[in-house]
Image (tube, grey):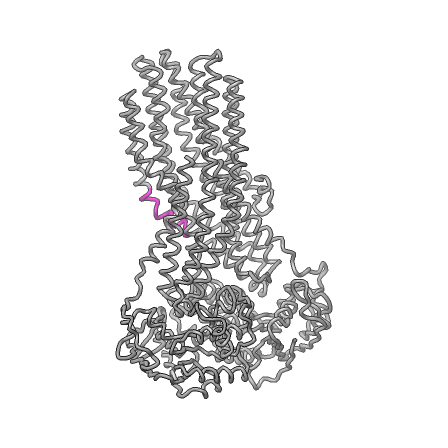
Amino acid sequence: MKRAIVLDPLARPQGAVWWRLALALVLGVAAAGSAVALLATSAWLITAASAQPPVLLLMVPIVAVRAFGVGRGVFRYVERLVGHDAAYRVLGETRARITGRLEKLAPLTSQRKGDLLARLVLDVDAVLDLWLRVLLPATVAAVTAAATVALLAILLPTAGAAVAVAVLIACTVVPWLTARTAERAERNLAGARGDVAATTTEALLTAADVVAFNAIDTVLDDFSRRDARLAAAERRSAWSAGLGSALLVLCVGGASIAALVLGSTANITGAVFAVLVLTPLALADVLGGLPAAAQLAIRVRASLDRVQELVDTPSSVTEPVEPLPLPAGRDLQVRLLRAGYDGSDVLDGLNLDLPAGSRVVITGPSGSGKSTLASVLLRFLEPRGGQVLLDGVDVARLQGDQVRSVVGLLTQESHVFDTSIRENLLLAKPGASDLRLWEALYRARLGLLVESLPDGLDTMVGEHGARLSGGERQRLAFARLLLADRDVLVLDEPTEHLDEETGRALLADLFGAAGDRTVVLLTHRPELMPPHVTRQQVCLT
Amino acid sequence: MWAQEVVAQRAAAAVKSTLRRQVLEHSLKLGPVWLSGERSSALTTLLTKGLDDLDPYFARYLPQLVLASTVPAGVIGWMATGDLIAAGTVLITLPLIPVFMALIGWVTQARSRQRQHALAVLAHHFADVVGGLTTLKLFGRAKAQEQAVRRVTDRHRAASMGSLRIAFLSSFALELLASLSVALVAVGVGLRLVDGKLGLETALMVLILAPEAYLPLRQVGMQFHASADGVAASEEVFRVLETPLPVRGDRTDVPDLRASSLHLYDVTVRYPGRNEPVLDGFDLEVRPGEVVALTGPSGAGKSTVLAVLLGFVQPEHGVVVAGGSAADEFDPAEWRRQFAWVPQRPGLRLGTVADNVRLGRPDASDDEVRLALLTAGAADLPLDKAVGEQGQQLSGGQQRRVALARALVTNAPVLLLDEPTAGLDSSTEAEVIAGLRASGRTVLMVAHRPALIASADRTVDVAVRELVNA
């Protein structure tokens, strides 16, 4: 089970990081080994001392005891540093790889997109736990325990064998049992946790409605019912954690007693006997973390599986092997287009002419394929039939990024990054001068507002642009689109979340600022269109 | 040990459960304005993942603290029966551990906060990039993100390793102190053995017991680190719980607004972070049975008037009066019984259409729900139609009609409507307006559409204040 996680390409470290992990492992074994050796040498020292030999003979073990004592702390300290450093490197690399992979998948079209992504961010953090709390400690424990067994076997083979059996059980059966019981508990837990999270989110999102209708108690009661199920699942999972710890103590105790019995009948010196009996006790510390690691491994695996599943989603567009150069003309034609998500064709046999500089309004109820058309135009979705031609060239034979350097998109929920207004604009045109930024802001009718802000262009917009109103956010996204200077603007329900008046004003400004660009507006509210704009109107059904 | 683990985990589950409910209740009572923006998502994280970080605190740290304060005393007592000198050594070295722990903890606290912050920034950056990948791809910037994530991660890793180096020092010092102390005891015992001053059995007993005396304290140190996240979460929880609720009266004798007029006198409202007030000295009278339309450009504060009446927003000055008493003398829940509200973007909940309509009146009969939907122009919506999370599976217009039915089904005397007919075609709009008028209730509505404005008895213009331009 653990091997399955390591092989998981997502969490696999890069070349140089392997060395750091190996170093952390060696240091970990040195630290745990020091603890065992400390007890073993102390036992030997004391028993030997009781025979009252010359003090000089005891000098070596005395030094060894001190060295192991200091070594345990020092090794442990360095191990933790090296281990954390390596784990953070792996996490960074995993995040980067996932970003690279998701870039090809974007835009994700699942209904639960936001939920999936929020979960992804938490799930990816499981990589840290995987290395720091599962794989490294488990390997350190196994190696150290094996070394301890080897030492005991040299002293007395039968005792070594007895302790080996106990260690084997502690390293295999105990984690396996813990993991198995934890797996069931974890499944219930994950369900209950998701349920509570969803209820919480909903309660907070609908807080205004709930308070206004005096429904706080209803909502809280509903929440408590779900919460009680979560608490019950948590209680059950406690049993499995406790079970592992208890079994482990039994194993170690058993090993000590076995060594005691075997040692007392064997022909060995008192000092060796003391070492035989006492050393297995040190294993309690060494192996103690295994049940917890096994339990955590289950959770980590579930997280990484979810990430893997998302990352394995097939990409919805195939890039051409030998892309054609970008043609010069900007006339777009849609010919017999058949396309849709999830197996059904919402668009079937669509023909559309979008000459350069034209204004086209495409209407239709939700589900009639407006967003699907936008995705096809942006090369976010592969048509199942028909073509989109740019100046006579099938866009499927152009690179996606090239197509998107001609066609730009404004959606109902353009992402605004949690940084300054300036940075948000610059991503559309890196290195643009402030003058260009202000020009774009004024064309998007946001200039006056930004100028009135104390920090101007450097104003931070907050998470998802929370410090701006809905209309301001759309205008910022529009300014960004203007700055990117695309020749074809696809506007997919840009007024969806705005009140009527704001929406009307935004559309008027959008068409006003578009200049000689082609504008394709997809909307179910055509009544908000500025009346004076001459346009072609197409209705999807 | 098993029992300890089970009991501790159960206690943790119970505590978390209580905290979750309390925080949720308190934040709902603090109201939607307090909850707006970034706070709501931060709270969701706190209530789910944040509180789970408390597990190590309750399940390990607290029990360990109890062990640490009892076990060493017993162990030392036992050792003293065999070897007074060894017991004395332990007794002298043991207090050094908490002293050093406190000293180091004091020094490292700031650094460990920094580290937590660096990690949070990293996770946030990753979330922001992942959330905005489509946008980045649109601008041909997505391919650069893989490298950007790598670069930002590296920068923050370097910073956080610096803090870790110091943070781990405390457990290092603990281990070292414990090890050295055990070694001190062991070597002392050994030397006295050589001199024949001590028997082997006593020596062995002392040797086995000595680490046990230090173990609980060492583990407190380790668990303290593991529970640091939980402690941070609990601080956050208490910060929320200690946010005072706005002071409101507890009178329950709210005047019936079917008979009394409602007044706003000189109401001024200013939102935090904005210089200009959104409402400035606003006056309004709404008489029973009247239909009043609030008009004015976007941003003039029309919705704010409704929020003031609902008690979501405290005016900076000015007062809402009903039947000769100020609104803030009344118990807020009792006061809100006089109103039913249709927000601009209704928050519908997972369940059926009927569940949503019944939000304010859980005991409404199916017929009453149907009648309300009919009046709201949504006769075509089946009662058992599923409403997804955040109203998914209903169109924007359907959501608004369900919200309208939800308001109509309560028998509140005053309806507060924020653009109730937006997204409806004109014939449905006419039906809805007729239904509203027929209900005979007092209506205060934010209106843009001419048909809606025309249907009002009276129009109040909420004028926009001039933006002061230097």
Q: Residue at x 48, y 82 (%)?
A: B435
Position of B176 with respect to A497 (left or right) is: left
Q: Could one spot residue A82 in this view of the protein?
A: no
User: Which stretch appears magenta?
Assistant: B105-117
Residue B303 in the image: above or below residue B71:
below
Foreground residue among A324 and A128: A128
Position of B198 with respect to A450 (left or right) is: left
Magenta-drawn stretch contains B41: no
Position of B273 with respect to A403 (left or right) is: left
Residue B415 at x, y percent in the picture: 41, 78
The quarter of the image holding the C terminus of chain A is bottom right
Residue B11 placement: quadrant: top left
Q: Residue at x 33, y 17 (%)?
A: B191
Prevalent SS, magenta region: helix
Q: Could one spot residue A357 in this view of the protein?
A: yes
Residue A381 at x, y percent in the picture: 65, 64
Residue A307 in the image: above or below residue A251:
below
Residue A58 placement: quadrant: top left
The quarter of the image holding the N terminus of chain A is top right
Residue A405 at x, y percent in the picture: 62, 67
Q: How many numbered discs?
A: 0
Magenta-drawn stretch contains B112: yes
Residue A233 at x, y percent in the picture: 47, 47
Foreground residue among B157 and B60: B60
